[in-house]
Image (tube, rainbow, N blue to C red):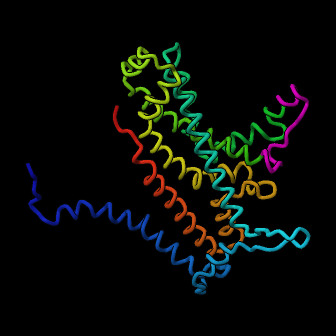
Amino acid sequence: MQSVFRNRWLPYLLLLPTIIILVMFLYYPILSTFQLSLFQAAPNGLDLTYVGTDNFARLLDPKITMNEKTGSLQLKGEYFFVLGRSLLFSVIIVGGGLALALGLAMLANQKVVGIRFYRTLLIWPYAISPAIAGVVFLFMFNPVGVVNYTFNSIFHVRPNWLGDPILTPALVIAASIWKNLGYNMIFYLAGLQNIPGDLLEAAAIDGANRWQRFQKITLPLLSPFTFFLLITNLTYSFFDIFGTVDVLAGPGPKNSTTVLIYNLYQDLQVNHSTGMAAAQSVLLFALVAFITFMQFRTREGRVAYGA
């Protein structure tokens, strides 16, 4: 049975509010950012000078030089170091966060006394913002915080969590994983509860051990959730991490926590280089879009949408 609108323009009128919102808050900002990336703004932000692709060329200039002592080539392009650091952060945050969330979801899926209380404790960090997550870790890991007090009491050492170029990035990564842990766990828990119990029981009767049941049944049936969480966590690791980085570490010792989104912020708010910031926005958008596209191309065919 096919329904037909009496007024041929009614469908378009119903779609009009959505189209207006998309144009105002998505397409127009994207086009404006791309346009701004082709200009260099004066410090007052009013006078624009057309520079073409010079902003992109400055960012992507590898600045390869030769070491006079060793004769080896050295990469001095700061943007490439920031890009590599951001990719490393993303891999650890996404991979580590999903693995930890899956493990906790499997524990929370057990039938034990008080399991709803434990589930609530594990899920509640998602209710706070990335900046608040940074504040929580800042209170815990500052020089006179509870973590250093515990370390000093047991091991008689006080690690410099906020001033070490290795510990500080690790702390930012840990805070980011903790912040998104509840979100990931909710989806995995829903997926685990939808796996037919008789399917696992049949596999156990056939002689499959716990690891084989997990590998051959649980993981494939969770693949739609994993695929979705890969996309959302990828976006989180590149964009939403800013609040945590800014509050907890800033650029970090030796710029060890300067990721792409924070580097963009520094160019815009600190250096007042609007054109460079816009160029970085375009490159960051293109990078995340490319990685997401590749995930759809390579992963979607291996996602099992049914038992």
Q: Is residue 32 left or right of residue 15?
A: right
In front of the other: 125 or 97: 97
* Rendered location of residue 205, percent (x, y): 41, 14
Measuring 8% from the left and 48% from the top, which residue is drawn there?
Answer: 1
x, y percent for residue 164: 83, 48
* Of the pair 196 and 281, the residue shown nearer to us: 196
Question: Looking at the magenta stretch, what is its main secondary structure?
Answer: loop
**Most foreground residue, 105 or 153:** 105
Which region shows up in magenta?
A: 150-167
Q: Is residue 175 above or below residue 44?
A: above
Q: Quadrant of residue 267?
A: bottom right
Relative to residue 236, is residue 96 depicted above or below?
A: above
| Apparent side of residue 255 relative to residue 303 in the rendered image (left or right) | right
Where is residue 133, by image quadrant?
top right
Q: Quadrant of the C terminus?
A: top left
Asked if residue 23 is among those painted magenta in the image, a careful observer would answer no
Magenta segment: does it hold 156?
yes
The residue shown at (49%, 74%) is 32
Q: Is residue 156 left or right of residue 79?
A: right
The residue shown at (65%, 50%) is 89
Measuring 71% from the left and 62% from the top, which residue is drawn there? 81
In the rendering, at what x and y percent does residue 188 appear? 47, 33
Q: How many marks?
A: 0
Instruction: Estimate the x, y position of residue 270 in percent, counting from the top left.
Output: 71, 68
